[in-house]
Image: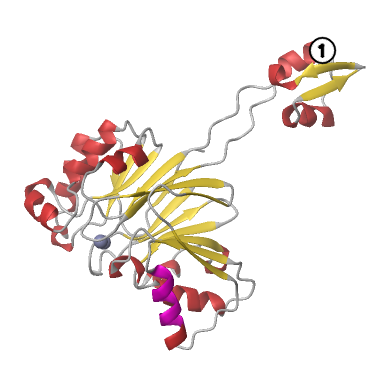
Amino acid sequence: MKLQFLGTGSGMPSKQRNVSGLALDLSNVTWLIDCGEGTQHQMLYTKIKPRKVTAVWVTHLHGDHVFGLPGFLSTRSALDGASPLTVYGPKGLKKWLEVTLRVTGSHLGYELTVIEYSDGDTFIQDDHLVTVRKLEHRFPSFGFRIDGQKKPGMLRVDLVKELGIPSGPIYRTIKESDQFEFEGKWYDSKEYVTEPIPGKIVAILGDTIPCENAQKLADGADLLVHEATFMEAEQALARKYGHSTTREATALANACAVGKLIVTHISARYVGREEEFVQEVVSDFPSSLVATDFLEYTVGD
Ligand SMILES: [Zn+2]
Ligand SMILES: [Zn+2]
């Protein structure tokens, strides 16, 4: 799984940071997490292909997270070979999209499915399991826990060779079937293959203050993407606007023992104070990054 940030600012775009947008590359398909205004323009500076986007996951309906969606959906229609697309989001998304597309006379040349999720829902999309949980914000906001595909275990060649089996297509059979036959004898494949390799877990949270569901989503994740709209000194402001501070993001990363933390949704008030901001995050949770527009990060291999 490879992530690329398309917008890492909060509220309104700045020259340094566009509003929320994040692409998730799952090798043969791409997902978008939020699609703030200008997201499709940001994509022009990357290798992301809009027609290969199969799903858009909307964390909440605040404008800085969705105002780019109708434009993205329409542009995609003008591209040859656009795949069917599913947009997942909270209640209200379907009506808003329907009205916007209808009033503007936008006809999509591909199949669009809009799914309105609720707290606790799970979905299988492109062989990945996604769990949705409600967070705490001024407005209904949600987070996603994405479980990557399990990979089959490795063939224990030493043991297979001991049986006198020469390399060939049978190696594949051993990896992919429960049992295999060699010279009239049946064997249990499990004993000749290592344990399956678990998929990577990525937790991506919408705007939120610290809450229990954030912990559930992030628990043991390989990567946590969390908002940090404010620094610790602006804690009162963060609470007033339903956002988190740097220290609240790192506290969650520590409590959930995540492998990596990336903070995003950063207020424009910190332009020119990037070093200070990074310092506050990294000092609390060393395995962390402060997202910048176009930052790429690969989870696992
Ligand atoms: Zn926001
Ligand atoms: Zn918001």
Of residues 193 and 209, the one drawn nearer to the viewer in this rendering: 209
Name the colour scheme: secondary structure
Find residue 83 and report its image quarter: bottom right
For the record, the magenta segment spans 93-101
Ligand 2: image quarter: bottom left
Find residue 186 and report its image quarter: top right
How crowded pointer 1 is (Cα within 10 Å; few <14, some 14-19, many 20+) is rated as few
Find residue 95 and report its image quarter: bottom left
Q: Position of residue 15 (x, y in %)?
A: 25, 69
Name the magenta segment's main secondary structure: helix
Of residues 77 and 59, the one drawn nearer to the viewer in this rendering: 59
Q: Residue furthest right?
A: 184
| Residue at point 59%, 47% (across, down) | 127
Tally of numbered discs? 1
Decide: is 12 above or below 32. Answer: below
Decide: is 184 above or below 287. Answer: above
Q: Is residue 210 visible?
A: yes
Q: Position of residue 291 (x, y in %)?
A: 30, 52
| Residue at point 9%, 55% (across, down) | 237
Decide: is 52 above or below 226. Answer: below
